[in-house]
Amino acid sequence: MFKIYREPELGEHFIVSADPAAGWDKCAMGAKSKTHADTAIVYNEKIDATQLGYEIYKLCMYLHKKTGIWPTAMPERQGGGLATIQILLSLNYPDIFRMPQMGKVDTSQTENYGWVTNQLSRPKGLSDLKLSLYQGVNKIYDLETLQQMSDFQIINGKPQARGGKHDDLVIMEMIGWQGWLMVPNKAIELQRPPDWFKNNTQNWNHSPKRWKK
């Protein structure tokens, strides 16, 4: 089930970040706005990583119809993420995030689709997320996400969920915020007048607060 906290706007660029299921965790997905720096839509269900690819595609199609801009799909590569990415590639999705080379002078994109969580990117991602919340820049409406954040602690020197708790929504937010920081805002790049988006966006009358798969 998708939880929609506000309606997407014409000309708004979204980052659709996702944490594929690993072990007993749920899959998590969120739509982070490049315009408002908020997570407008959240998805958190127990499905496999392959099905998550179809759910990401579904959400991206919805956002494209509402905004006129293709969202940037940004699933994590680990934890079954390759299966998720393969589905998006098979569906010819036009904008899948490619991981830059971090910690090097040359920060150009690699050929690796999806966000790669490693010993460099994880601490940076969590630190950036923490700072964005302290500064009040990053807006999160979902109570489950906020609860997971409150259960996120430093254990044996590593930030992680305490025993018996989940962290999938935290990782999803971490990836989404990295997308907000790294991915250029297409709405600014396009520099098209507001009427362009209206004229090139199909009517989309379905606007529930929640919708089921």
Image (spheres, helix red, strand yellow):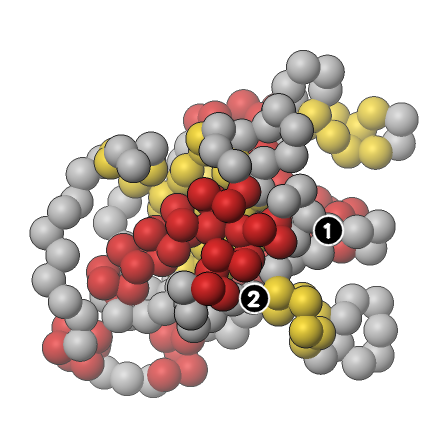
Query: What is the quadrant of residue 202 in the picture?
Result: bottom left
Q: Residue most toward the front?
A: 90
Q: In the rendered image, which residue does mark 1 sit on?
A: 117
Does residue 66 appear in this view? Answer: yes
Q: Give the percent coordinates (x, y) of residue 4.
A: 30, 40
The amino acid on which the numbered mark 2 sits, given as a three-letter code, is Phe
Q: In this view, does 90 lie above or below 200?
A: above
Q: How crowded is mark 2: few (under 14 residues within 10 Å), some or many (20 or more)?
A: many
Q: Give the percent coordinates (x, y) of residue 123.
A: 78, 47
Query: What is the quadrant of residue 156 in the picture?
Result: top right
Q: Give the percent coordinates (x, y) of residue 100.
A: 70, 70
Q: In the rendered image, which residue does mark 2 sit on?
A: 97
Q: Residue most toward the right?
A: 156
Identify which residue, 42 or 50, lies in the foreground: 50
Q: Give the percent coordinates (x, y) of residue 180.
A: 53, 60
Q: Is residue 10 left or right of residue 169?
A: left
Residue at the image position 73 percent from the left and 16 percent from the top: 163
Does residue 137 appear in this view? Answer: no
Q: In this view, does 34 lie to the left or right of 23?
A: left
Q: Residue most toward the top?
A: 164
Residue at the image position 33 percent from the left and 33 percent from the top: 1
The amino acid on which the numbered mark 1 sits, given as a three-letter code, is Thr
The alpha-carbon separation of the residues under discs 2 and 1 comes to 13 Å
Label 1 SS: loop
